[in-house]
Image (spheres, rainbow, N blue to C red):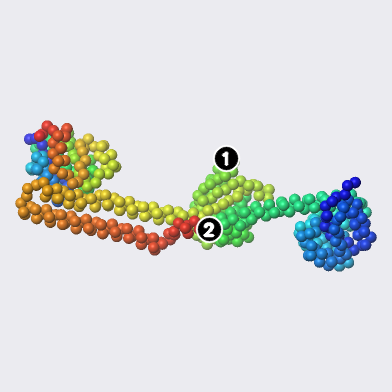
Amino acid sequence: MKLDQIPYIILVIEDNPGDYVLIEDYLLEHIASPEILHATSFCEARELLKENADRIQTIFLDLTLPDKSGEDLITEVVRLARKQPVIVLTGYTDASFAIKSLTLGASDYLLKDEMNAITLYKSLIYNIERKRSVMKLQESEQRYSDLFHLSPQPMWVFDTESLRILDVNQAAEKHYGYSAAEFYELTIEDIRPKESIAELHRIIEHNRANNIDFSKSVSKHIKKSGEVITVEVLTNKIVFKGRPARIVLANDITEKIEYIKAIEEQNKKLREIAWVQSHVVRAPLARIMGLVGLIQDEVMTEEEQNEILQYILTSAGEMDNIVKDIIDKTKEIDFEKERGSGINSPESAIEVK
Amino acid sequence: MGLKTLIVDDDHIFIFIAKKMLESAGFTSDPVVFGNGKKALQYLEEHADDADHFAIFLDINMPILNGWEVLDKLSEMPVKERISVYMVTSSVDSSDKKRAATYEVMKGFLEKPVGKEKYASLKEHEALREFF
């Protein structure tokens, strides 16, 4: 049979010299040049694991060592061996405990009396591969979990039947003022002002009846402090730990709306100014133009001419007042901007909190 | 009998100019002048039979009754058949024009300042031609 050429690095934790030699022999039957590290106690194993944490690919662990044994031993070794599968070696007398070892984090177990070269080799290969996929899966789960928990936008998951909040991210804790533990005691009704709860039920019922996945709405929410905010809510269907749920992304648009209101207010003032300009300013101007036309075209007495000049002066004065009025109105707009009055610049309105 | 001309405007300088221009244009030398719409309507009620036709130069922005309110009332008076209204304003909005089109008595828009030539051209206007 062709030997496996991969230079496996294996830690064998075994205090019985006979058993160790047997394991070594078995390994060499299928692997051309394994690097076998040997520890005869938990302390030794710990040192070897520390020194070779990134190199060791798998660990064979005997369950009875002079300085530690049983459940304690497994737990400790599994804790130290983050990247390696731990394969438990045990005698017949511990068979039932061997099964329990799997729940403690061991990857596999082998009964010493049934062990042979091929079962040892198979277990080695299988568990290295399996550990690798498990770690990949964990990494990917962690990544997705981070996307949720570290998202700068408040997010949570709620049960569509009980309406309880099942999971919540840091941004939601920060923005709404509840700790995660407090959130888990709440339903999504509790983050709504009373008057908008009916609307909430309508939306949920609508989503359920029409089997809607993505849904978007603008709602009022209430923080722990009692502050009511306007949020744009995006939700999507999700199964969370076996429960029918929805994942929610909440975007606080309170400031944005206030900002828009402020802009509309300013636009109104600007429209007023435009109206004044076109109607009011033009009135005295038209009069001056008409009076000048009279002087040009008509034959008049000196008295009449003086009267007209007086009219021109009056009209010019009137126009001057109107222009001053426009300047005052424009200043009013600037003044409000400076004062702030709860209105922020567009930059701060979209700033990520 | 013939044509009677009314100027309805709260701006006495405009009235001063209009009187001069109307005379110079050969339109009329004795217009009847009102500072607000209410007085003009009163006059029309009382003097409906004084003339065959009334030409009214009506300002839009006035106190008491503005130009639009005057038009509303005019449209309900029997004398409306013998009335031609020219809206006079310092600036013409397109929305004003649209609104004006809904009144039968409305015959035209004049933007201030209204020159002699403009008044003269009105003598050729379909509604008034027969009186000159």
The chain containing the residue under callout 2 comes to: A
Residue A291, percent from left and from top: 14, 50
Q: Is residue A243 left or right of residue A61?
A: left
- Asked if the residue under mark 1 is in contact with the one under mark 2, i.e. CB atoms within 8 Å, the reply is no
Q: Write down the residue under mark 1.
A: A210
Chain of the residue where label 1 is placed in the rendered structure:
A
Please give the name of the residue rendered at 57% of the width and 57% of the height, measured from the top-left corner: A152
Residue mark closest to the camera, 2 vs 1: 2
Residue A36 visible somewhere in the drawing: yes
Q: SS class of the residue under badge 2? A: loop
Q: Answer yes or no: is residue A92 visible.
A: no
Closer to us: A116 or B36:
A116
Q: Mark 2 or 1 closer to N-term?
A: 1
Tag 1: amino acid: Asn
Instruction: Report x, y in % for residue A270.
Output: 33, 53
Identify residue for label 2.
A352
Q: Are marks 2 and 1 on the same chain?
A: yes
- Check the image and name the residue furthest to the left: A301
- Label 1 Cα neighbours within 10 Å, binned few <14 / some 14-19 / many ≥20: few
Q: What amino acid is found at the position of numbered circle 2 in the picture?
A: Val
In the rendered image, which quarter is residue A104 located in? bottom right
Q: Is residue A222 left or right of residue A118?
A: left
In the depicted view, which residue is nearer to us: A237 or A3?
A: A3
Q: Secondary structure at mark 1?
A: loop
- Residue plotted at (59% across, 47% down): A236
Pick the front one: A298 or A257: A298
Residue drawn at x 16%, y 42% as measured from the top left = B57
Q: Is residue A36 above or below residue A289?
A: below
In the image, residue A226 sits, relative to residue B64, either above or below, namely below
| Residue A158 % position (x, y) | 61, 51
